[in-house]
Image (tube, rainbow, N blue to C red):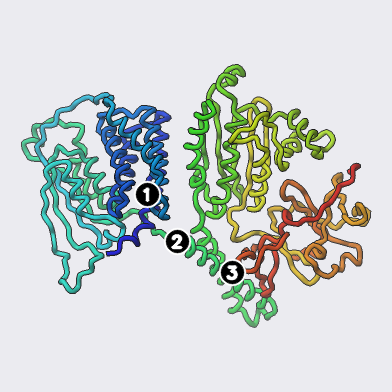
Amino acid sequence: MDITRFHAAFFEESREGLDAMESGLLAMESGRSDAETINVIFRAAHSIKGGAATFGFTAVTDLTHLLETLLDEARGGRRVLDGDATGALLVSVDVLRGLLAGCEHGDPIDQAALAQARSGLERLLAAEAKPAPEPPKTVDTDNGDWRISFTPAASLFMSGNDPLRILRELASHGELGVTCLDVRLPRFEQMDPYEAYLAWDLTLPGSVPRSAIDEAFAWVEDECELSIEAHRSEVSAATAPVSARSEPAEPDIAVAANRRTSDHDNSIRVAVGKVDALINLVGELVITQAMLRQRSEQLDPVAHEELMAGLVQLERNTRDLQESVMGVRMLPVEFAFSRFPRMVRDLAARLGKKVHLRTSGEATELDKGVIEKIVDPLVHLVRNAIDHGLELPAERRAAGKDETGTITLTAAHQGGHIVIEIGDDGRGLDRERILRKAAERGLHVPENPTDAQVWDLVFAPGFSTAEQLTDLSGRGVGMDVVRKNISALGGQVEIRSGKGTGSTISIRLPLTLAIVDGMSVAVGNEVFIVPLNIVIESLQPAASDVRTIAGESRVLRVREDYLPLINLAEQYGLPASRNAEHGNPIAVVVESDGRRLALEVDDLLGQHQVVVKNLEANYRRVPGVSGATILGDGRVALIVDPAGIAQPVRLPAAA
């Protein structure tokens, strides 16, 4: 059997296991350790070891064996995992990530990192163990046994599991009685080597902990029929005192185990490419439905009543299908937040600071594509908050604060958007210092600027108030890239800060990049889509509100501000619009990349959802265009990207 086809599932499940291990170890380090946490870490290591041994990844198997040995001593109460042990285990988790990546892509093993991880674990195992305090002892005179009925699903082998491994693990805990049941075994010519046919009735001594049996079946309980019962003799049941292990004697345990198996919320792994193809097909269906609706507007609704009713039903079903399929790509923000506990721990130790990370709203869902692209900006903002925002413990004590600073990560839905906020209770932004740096760099600063206008200066390219350069921050790059990346996602970012009380950076993002709410505008004979999330207002200005600067660039006066006025017909090389001839343009005011622009168009056609098509994948990148869509009449409409519209405009000094 070619087992290499199971590699992808193994690597993905192993990465999930490493995430669980890292999360558990960080919880232990912060004082939230309990038996279940250690068991979760142990099971993850045990699963990775078993899979690696099956596929012949020797380096992974050997390292996880050391991990498993150390964790087994901890869960058995023979060793306490202190800070040094937790640190060594975290280093091993990092090395395992590298080993798995090397096995997956055929890269050479980092022997130095592997040797360091192994020596750390071996040193801990060689040292005298500090046993955990023993719990109060109870007397258990029961001389019964465990009776286990194990019937694997026919597809058990396909998930990389092996019943023989489970039997060997059970036998390691005590004398195992085995009765093989072959009632499902077909005739030889009908056998499929990829299917499991055998079942077993098993017995184990009653002295074996129930938790050890559960762990043996932990990874197959959803792929088998399983019954575990404690059988006790009549004499011991009548005379023996109840012990701490008497819970498995309850008669409904086997029923509960089977119910858990049958009611489990089953799931399947699907390649992202297949999901994207499905979303694309649904998008095409939405476009076709819009075409039918537009064509039907020319029909007599009385003469075609049944057809109209069918089209209404089609529109309703199409929208429901569209929402359901889009939900497939939605993932909890926890996928982005989960990497920060470890990062905060390591960075705080490196800078000599004490930091507590608090998160909320991890279950808030966001499009997978958005999550992947927002991770890097979030990493930069969290690093910045720890490096620049939070003070050293001594400085915090002198200011009357707790010496442990707090970083908060929150996520919440607001309408059709998600808002992610990164906050700290540190020193806050220094208004005067920012203004001095802006003056040194020659940045334009409004007269009597508000706090929001001052905070906005930190997004200028190359801006930094750091007195010295470090390998973490202070090199004048980063915040401008953060805003650029967020704007590319159709999002916005703003800062709130108070001196001595900390700062909060708020990021507002669309839930998905596949569908946008847009305003359709006419420019000459073409239709363009302006995303609604960047539209501030639309107006028809008077001729006196439009001024020309330096003989070429124009600005539009909107109340007390002057905004660059960009003619979309000229921008995209189209024939002059009719509004340019009659002098009555319509302006759509938008905000992007922290600045406001006015887009001159011929007409406002309406608002509706559009399916976004990637222009680069089908043609090439066009400045000022973020994508395209297909209208109900079959025409292609480009989606305007104000951030990409390059038209240098110098505002008048008196503005």
List x then y, in percent, for residue 208: 17, 39
Q: Secondary structure at mark 2?
A: loop
Disc 1 versus disc 3: nearer the observer: 1
List x then y, in percent, for residue 17: 37, 46
Q: Residues within 10 Å of mark 2 (few under 14, many from 20)?
A: few
**Amino acid type, mark 3:** Val
Could you tell which of marks 2 and 1 lies nearer the N-terminus? 1
Residue 644, located in which quarter of the rendered image?
bottom right
Disc 2 versus disc 1: nearer the observer: 1
List x then y, in percent, for residue 64: 31, 42
225 horizontally vs 557: left or right: left
The outermost residue toward the bottom is 303
Q: Residues within 10 Å of mark 1 (few under 14, many from 20)?
A: many
Could you tell which of marks 2 and 3 lies nearer the N-terminus? 2
- Mark 2–mark 3 Cα distance, whole angstroms, equals 23 Å
List x then y, in percent, for residue 349: 50, 29
Q: Which residue is mark 2?
A: 271
Viewer-closest of 384 and 265: 384
**Amino acid type, mark 2:** Ala
Could you tell which of marks 1 and 3 lies nearer the N-terminus? 1
Residues at marks 2 and 3 touching, judged by CB atoms closer than 8 Å: no
Q: Secondary structure at mark 3?
A: helix
Q: Which residue is mark 1?
A: 14
The outermost residue toward the left is 235
Is residue 259 visible in the rendered image? The answer is no
Q: Secondary structure at mark 1?
A: helix
Identify the residue shown where x is 19% and y is 73%. Answer: 190
Residue 286 shows which numbered tag?
A: 3
Quarter of the picture containing the C terminus is: top right
Q: Is residue 460 above or below residue 498?
A: below
